[in-house]
Amino acid sequence: SMCVLTIKRDENLMPLRAKSRIVVLGNHEERVWSKADKFAPVLRFDSLRFLTSLAVEKRRRLKQGDCKNAFCQGELPPEELTIIRPPPGDPDATKDEYWVLKKT
């Protein structure tokens, strides 16, 4: 895991507030995924029809889109246990401390 710091600025580029979030580095995970375990959030058919009809009505061209935060703030199922180490440099973390995640 690692800590990502972001500084929000106002219209004059002066610092307004600082935000931090902890990110789990999934690329270091050693897990074998079966085909049944892999899934991605998809657009419901009625939402797709609505967006298509809106694009036709407004004479817009449809393009592919992507949701960057599709998995943010999702509740983890109780049977799926995800344990991480605190980010390096955390002053409150002990040497053998681990965290159990509740949200993605």
Image (cartoon, helix red, strand yellow):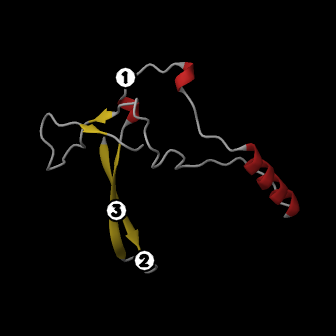
Q: Residue at x 36, y 75 (%)?
A: 16
Q: Quadrant of the N terminus?
A: top left
Q: Nearer the viewer, mark 2 or mark 3?
A: 3
Instruction: Give the quarter of the image for residue 42.
Output: top right
Q: Residue at x 80, y 49 (%)?
A: 49
Q: Residues within 10 Å of mark 3 (few under 14, many from 20)?
A: few
In the rendered structure, which disc, 3 or 1, sits on the residue that comes first in sequence? 3
Badge number at residue 10: 2
| Secondary structure under the numbered disc 3 in the rendered image | strand
| Secondary structure under the numbered disc 2 in the rendered image | loop
Q: Nearer the viewer, residue 30 or 100?
A: 100
Q: Nearer the viewer, mark 2 or mark 1?
A: 1
Q: Residues within 10 Å of mark 1 (few under 14, many from 20)?
A: few
Q: Nearer the viewer, residue 55 or 10?
A: 55
In the rendered structure, which disc, 2 or 1, sits on the residue that comes first in sequence? 2
**Residue 19 percent location from the top left of the image:** 34, 62
Q: Residue at x 35, y 33 (%)?
A: 82
Find out whether the residues at labels 3 and 1 contact each other: C-beta distance under 8 Å: no
- Give left or right: position of 99 versus 102: left
The amino acid type, in three-letter code, at marker 2 is Asp
* Disc 3/disc 1 C-alpha distance (Å): 30 Å
- Give left or right: position of 92 versus 28: left
Instruction: Give the quarter of the image for residue 20.
Output: bottom left
The amino acid type, in three-letter code, at marker 3 is Lys
| Secondary structure under the numbered disc 1 in the rendered image | loop
**Residue 18 percent location from the top left of the image:** 32, 66
Badge number at residue 86: none
Determine which residue is flagged by label 1. Answer: 30
Determine which residue is flagged by label 3. Answer: 19
The amino acid type, in three-letter code, at marker 1 is Glu
Q: Quadrant of the C terminus?
A: top left
